[in-house]
Every structure is written in structure tokens, then in C-alpha cells.
Amino acid sequence: MTDKLPSAPVRAEVLVQALPHMQRYDQEIVVIKYGGHAMGDPAAAEDFAEDIVLLEQSGVKPIVVHGGGPQIGRMLDKLGIKSTFEGGLRVTDEATVEVVEMVLAGSINKQIVGWISGEGGRAIGLCGKDGNMVTARKAVRTAVDPASNEERELDLGFVGEPEVVDRAVLDAVLKAELIPVIAPVAAGADGQTYNVNADTFAGAIAGAMNAKRFLLLTDVPGVLDKDRNLIPELTVEDCRRLIADGTITGGMIPKIETCIYAIERGVEAVVILDGKVPHAVLLELFTDYGAGTLVRA
Ligand SMILES: Nc1ncnc2c1ncn2[C@@H]1O[C@H](COP(=O)(O)OP(=O)(O)O)[C@@H](O)[C@H]1O
Ligand SMILES: CC(=O)N[C@@H](CCC(=O)OP(=O)(O)O)C(=O)O
């Protein structure tokens, strides 16, 4: 898993290396979280879509969960709505949740479906609300108040976390040989729309679907240490230590928390990797050039 590619991979070379191994995950579910930063590069986005179609054609059952944090940020800016984060989560008021749903379940979701269609795949765009796939509840987070040193509850507004995942919709979609592309928006039992962090959402899907592999595509090579060197492998215990000592911060926190969640629910391996690398998904699953950080029990 730690070998490095000697140079930037060329599409044909990647395919030649991957083809003999394409039976590796036959009929297995692989959940791929496609982060908003990773999808910013149009060439890499095309490669990503091509990889997803190749996976499906080779017998894998890919499920794509996407983010769109930077894209939401740009739309909020345009609309003059201020946004703040607490522990990597966007504090979400009523105006913000409306924009989040519009950007995630609207433009980004359909853009990814379009990319996959453009590569000859049949994708279906969904969000947690569709068929009651994911029911969310209000997320509760605490932080230590530096003034009093006391732990206090943070009000993140309409930030949700998955409470129930009903796999019936995804089972039906996979049976129909469609590729699900899911936006991390869900309703609560009370009908309230919640903004769910895409990493958290993807972890809940990977756990509920007993995924064989769970890939988190982002814009950094993986988890980096304090000197910005890649950490190739981490145990759950290491992860907790790196969060506590401040090596892992911001958007990497929900990623690591979701790795732990998925592993505790039986997902064999979770990999955090750079989605801007051409054919990152094929390279990770079907060659020995696995890059990124592998998180295991
Ligand atoms: N130890 C770390 N290693 C790597 N990235 C880290 C670390 N700590 C914080 N980060 C930040 O986490 C970011 C990835 O999370 P995020 O911005 O939410 O990405 P995505 O849009 O892919 O979900 C990185 O770009 C980096 O700024
Ligand atoms: C609660 C929360 O933080 N939700 C995220 C949802 C999108 C997301 O997670 O996108 P990335 O994967 O690109 O970061 C947000 O509003 O930005």
C-alpha cells in the first residue's frame, strides 16, 4: 500500500496495471466520498467519473457520496450570507440550510451525475431525503470554553448527524445496476432539513451497506504529521491521539471520526487520499500503488 508511483500516471498505463486486478471487488460495495475540494479540478473530475464507470462495469457496486463545502461557501458569499465553522462543521442557520440544499442536492449532485453519464455510466442522483434513506437528528457538539475552562454545548443550528439509514433504496438502486450519487442532506423525524457533513454521511452509508472499502477523496495526500509528511497508516487509537494533540484539525476531524465510525461497524479498510491525482480510485483499488493514509482497527 505504500509504494509510490514513479511519476504522474498516464491513463493507458493506469488501465494496463489495473485490468488484471479488476475482479478483486467483484459484487462488493465500495463507498467513495468525493470531497468538494477534490472535484474542483475539471481534468481530475473526468478521470473520477471514468473510474466510477469502470468500477461498475467490472462488477463492483460503487456508491458515491459527495461534498461541496467550497461551492457552498462561494454561493453564500455571493448571497452575502456569513458562514462560520466549529470543529470542521458549518454552523447552519435557516438561510444557510436552504443554500446548502440548493447547492448540494441541486447543482453539484446533477453535475456529478452528468459527468458519469458523459463517460457512459447510468447514475442516479439522490439525497438522504429520497425514500427516507437517511433520517438525521440535530448534531450535538461541545467545546471547552477557554475563559472558564468549562465544557459548553455548541449550537450548530441545522447541522445534522445520521440517525437511521434505511438501505432499501440503495439496495433497489444497486439491483437495477444504477450508480447512486448521494448529496449529504437529510430530514429529521420532524421534517426539518439538516446539513450533514459529507464525510459523516458517507461513513453512515458505508457502515449500513457493509461496504468492503471506503475511500475518502480530498485535496491533500492523506493525513499529514506536524512536519507535513504523509502518514501511510493509522490505527483508531493513533487517530484519537492525533486529534487530541492538535495534529489533525478542521475538515480532517470529521473525516477521521467517520473512519473510526465505519471501522467500528465492520468496514474492513478506509483510505483517505488525494482525489486530484489522476485515476486515484482505480489506482487505490486495483494496483499496489495505494497512496494516502490507510486507517484500520
Ligand atoms: N493532519 C492533517 N493532515 C491533512 N490535512 C489536514 C490535517 N489537519 C487538518 N487538515 C485539513 O483538512 C483539509 C481536508 O478537509 P476538507 O477541507 O473538509 O476537505 P474535503 O472538501 O475534501 O472534505 C485539508 O485540506 C487540510 O487543510
Ligand atoms: C455540517 C457541514 O459542515 N456540512 C458541509 C456539507 C458539505 C461537505 O461536507 O462538503 P466537503 O466534503 O466538500 O467538505 C458544509 O456545509 O460544508
Image (cartoon, grey):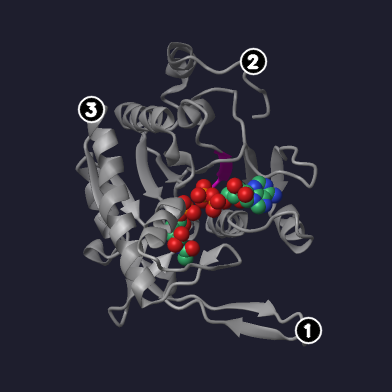
**Mark 1 residue element:** loop
Q: Name the residue under label 2.
A: 6
Q: Is residue 144 left or right of residue 13?
A: right
Task: Check disc 1 and give the amino acid type.
Answer: Asn
Q: Which residue is drawn at 52% across and 81% down?
A: 155
Residue 59, horizontal then vertical, whole percent? 33, 30
Q: How far apart are marks 2 and 1 (CA)?
A: 49 Å
Q: Is residue 263 left or right of residue 70?
A: right
Residue behind label 3 places its C-beta within 8 angstroms of ligand 2: no
Residue 148 to residue 139: above or below: below
Q: Is residue 121 left or right of residue 34?
A: left
**Mark 2 residue element:** loop
Q: Name the residue under label 3.
A: 120
Magenta region includes residue 143: no
Residue 59 to residue 196: above or below: above
Please provide the residue range marked out in magenta. Answer: 268-273
